[in-house]
Image (cartoon, helix red, strand yellow):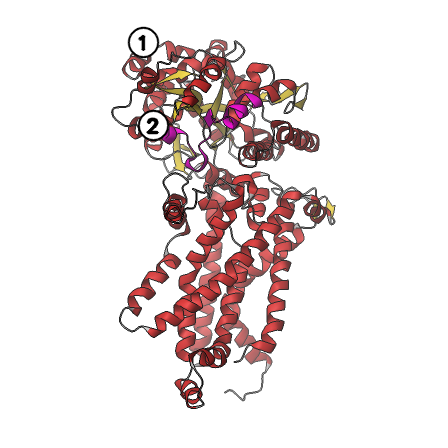
Amino acid sequence: MKKTVWGKSLLGISALALGLTLAGCSTGKTADKSTSDKKVTITFWHGMNGPYAKALDSIIKDFNGSQDKYVVKGTAQGDYTALQQKIMAGAKSKSLPTISQTTYTTVPDYVKNGFITPLDPYMIDGADKLSASDLKDIYPAFISSSKYQGKYYSIPFSKSTRIMYYNKTLMDQLGVKMPKSWEDIQAMAPALKAKGVMAVGFDKSFDMELEGLARQAGNALVATKGKSFQANLNTKQTLEATHFIWDMIQKGEAKTAGEDIYGDKAFTSGKTLFYVGSSAGVSHMKTGAPKDLDWGTMPLPTYKGKSATELAGNDIVMFKSASTDQQKGAWAFMKFLMSKKETIKWAEATGYVPLRKSAVQDADFQAFLKKDPTSEASVKSLPGGFQSTAFIGFTEYRNNLLSAVDAMLTKSETPEKAMGDLQTKTKQIIKDNN
Amino acid sequence: MINEKPTIKSSLKALLYLLPMLVITVMFNIWPIISSFLMSFYKDYNFYTDEVGGLGFDNFLYLWNDPDFHLAVRNTLIFVAGVVPTTVILSLVIALLLNQIKVFSGFFRTVYFLPFVTSTVAIAMVWNWIYHSDYGLMNYFLGFFGVHPINWLTNPHYSLLALIIMSIWKGLGFNIILFLVGLNNIDKGYYNAAEIDGANALQRFWNVTIPLLSPITFLVSVNGIIGSFKVFDQIFALFQGTPGPGKADLTIVYYLYQKFYTEYKYPVAAASGVVLFFLILLVTLVQMWYSRKHVHY
């Protein structure tokens, strides 16, 4: 009796110990295990799902078939928020993949914490580098956002722009001409309001449009200044831009989406004549809009005679923890993704924009746009595209920016107060970190 | 066996039996608590390399000076005060009613229990629709009583109330079941004796049901208070990843989440967790002290 008890408990302990050791081993080795046929495995975390994941998988398959040295293994990690959390956990437990999708605005934080490695040895200097003409071919806004402190840390990948949707049916009914500028829209808004239609609908927050207008008025919300950064959140230009949007909302000539999150519902139900949203929403609009609604897309209107659209979306970064072979393979894959052929394929399948000018001019892609004119607006707005300035503490700043916009909307704080507070906080963040 | 004197050998043997559970508890409960306590005192901490610049009260000072944290504490307290008493009283009333009917009681028990077993995200999606200012059920019903449509989810004055209502509804089922168990455990003899003494229904309720149900009431309220202090998932789901309009639904755990996951201020997040720990401890101690006098086992 006694013996069996001891025996059983010993068995239990050893089983537990074995389990723990196995668990310990499996987390440590995933990063640099290679498959039996000596191909180098490149692990790739991404935040794509549904049709986007399908398109990405097919591109990965193409890459794996195109050469015999590397195997890319893509794994979806849920949405972008979940992906960020996985990267954090991966960094803590030293089990990061070779490469991952991430927003370029996290790059400064990742560099500071030593997660990611510059791409310069591969992208600018290596045997497999991007040529000068390649670098010129990729839209400047993408290339410049890949750069941080003089080095390239990411490649652009899934990128969308802000565009304007218009309700042609309603425009004809109301006798409204196509606006060219924000000023046109402002001028037509009171008459539209009298007829019970709001001129513009925004998503839940108008921060991206605010940044666009501020740039058109003359300054970025946060600009680089030498090696440091300058917050321009309550400059004359920024306040003018903020007032432009906020005043229209206060007067009932424009609205944000509130609990709908996206402004497409108010747009398709005819509450707003125009809707400023992501070009990634085109496919959603196609399925969501009523059949008898004639709608179209156009690049964002100009403001003070300038055009601008914020480019959103994700980049791909390479982690330091990967082996040299993995990094070489990862670069080969990154270059593959940026190639003209693949970027066209990706754009056609997902509605994200092509990364290269030559891809946009390509005859096949132009034919695709002819067939699908709603995709044209985002491509047309690419030359005026910009990306927010990334700096350490950007996510905290963006939280604050969203809170400031929210306070102006839900607590009717004046732009002077909300943006003034934001300026103070942002200066502090820059001072603390950069 | 029971009267056996403890020897070193028997103690070791007992320890061996306890070992698997101890290993798990220490690894997943005790160690995280200790390390987050320690982390809350770290200065210039690098989360990834575990380099600590020094120890101090800086993180608590940060909380002391952060208006957002004050707001989070305030919202959490309002939430607890709004949810717990109502949940306890409502679930007691419903349990009493369910105890009276015989025919459909099983059916109703299932109905009330459903919210408890449904995922919070699914519940929040439904409530998101109920609360919608344009086509929500809530405003539709209130319209019958002449109430103007309320922006439940976008007006900072109402959004905490919206969260409280949803949480009460979600919490009812489990508490009703507990109260039903408690009610069934009360000996019928007490009621018979009270009736012979001429006590009417209300008197029987006050003098028999309430005192004899007090252990369950105590359990339900302690449980409810702890759970409500830790509220997070409902907010995240109902307001789709934001702390509500104008931060009206920012609670301590939501604050912790923001500091940890989006602002990378790990020690501040740990410090807010420690503050929450002591808040809950304090309230629970007060409840324990109160229960000594008023709970009859």
The three-letter amino acid code for the residue at tag 2 is: Thr
Q: Looking at the image, which is closer to me, A142 or A381?
A: A381
The residue located at (68%, 47%) in the rendering is B63
Q: Quadrant of residue A346?
A: top left
Asked whether residue A120 appears in the rendered view, the answer is no
Queried whether the magenta region covers residue A261, the answer comes back as yes
Q: What secondary structure is the stretch in magenta mostly built from? A: helix
For the point 60% across and 42% down, which residue is it? B48
* Residue depth check, mark 1 versus mark 2: number of the one nearer the observer: 2
Does the rendering let one see residue B136? yes
Q: Residues within 10 Å of mark 1 (few under 14, many from 20)?
A: few
Where residue A130 appears, as percent x and y from the top left, is: 48, 15
**Which residue carries the number 2 mark?**
A268
- Residue stretch in magenta: A242-266
Nearest the viewer among A403 and B140 is B140
Query: Which corner quadrant holds the N terminus of chain A?
Result: bottom left
Q: Is residue B295 left or right of residue B191?
A: right
Residue that numbered label 1 is attached to: A363
Picture residue at 64% right of the left edge, 22% below the top: A232
